[in-house]
Amino acid sequence: MPEQFHRPVRRPSAAFDNLVGTADSAEAVRVAHATASALLTRARADESGASAERLIAFTAEHGIDDIAELWATAPAVSLPGALWRLYLLQLAIHSDPQTSALLYERGRIELASVDPVVAGAPVPASPEELVALIDTIMRGVFRGDFSVALERAAAFCRVQVSGATHVADDYESTEAERASELTTRARRLHAYANDLSAAAGLWRVGGLN
């Protein structure tokens, strides 16, 4: 019988706010931690960078479900939890770079903090440049300073939170449903920013596992 191939699961960016893990269990958590540690160790040991590039492109080739099975149930502030949030962020940007660019630029204008500088996007950032940015952050995860990559991702989330919140306010009186979607997105990104920053702090003191 010929081998069957399954099409990657390419969820639209609207699903980004609804992606959650399946029922938790001690075994699922154990597997999550073991696979995340092994994957990161292997990628960092590969001096050619080929492993890192494959991992960066993973969701485009295989979808998100394989990763979800491994890491979606892990604690938010853990190695697998951080990797899961990074992959979700990458997927959201790749799936809808136009919306990501709109929210990022609005957030950059409105936000009085260093987060746009930490995230490192061009000013202004095109959709294509934001896709390149998140892939660069992912390279930092697998080849560079892991804590710096996490902080850049957290800063990116905070800029998008600002953008989503302000754009939601713009839509409130004319498109209440769209405003609600953006508010939900902002809440989720705010949580991700906090989780990723906390994970970065733990990584720096050797406490992220």
Image (cartoon, helix red, strand yellow):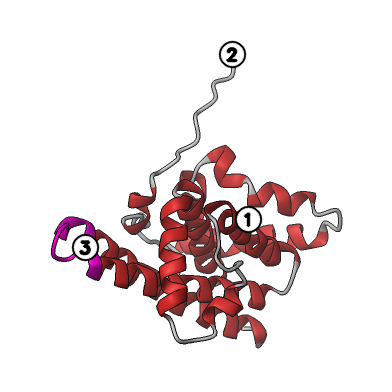
The question of residue 177 being in magenta is answered with yes
Amino acid marked by disc 1: Ala
Q: Is residue 73 left or right of residue 50?
A: left
Quadrant position of the N terminus in the picture: top right
- Where disc 3 sits, the SS reads helix
User: Tag 3: residue type?
Assistant: Tyr
Q: Which residues are magenta?
A: 169-180
Q: Which class describes the residues within 10 Å of circle 2: few (<14), some (14-19), or many (20+)?
A: few
* Residue 12 image point, x, y percent: 38, 45
Q: Earlier in the sequence, mark 2 or mark 1?
A: 2
Q: Quadrant of residue 186?
A: bottom left
Residue visible at 57% across and 70% down in the picture:
79
The kind of secondary structure element at disc 1 is helix
Taking the spot 69% from the left edge, 66% from the top edge, the residue there is: 140
Does residue 132 sit above or below 153 in this rendering? Answer: above
| Residue topped by disc 2 | 2
Q: Nearer the viewer, mark 3 or mark 2?
A: 3
Please, what is the three-letter code of the amino acid marked with disc 2? Pro
SS at mark 2?
A: loop
**Mark 3 or 1, nearer chain start:** 1
- Mark 1 burial class by Cα count in 10 Å: few <14, some 14-19, many 20+: some
Marks 2, 1: nearer the viewer = 1
Q: Quadrant of residue 22?
A: bottom left
The residue pinned by badge 1 equals 132
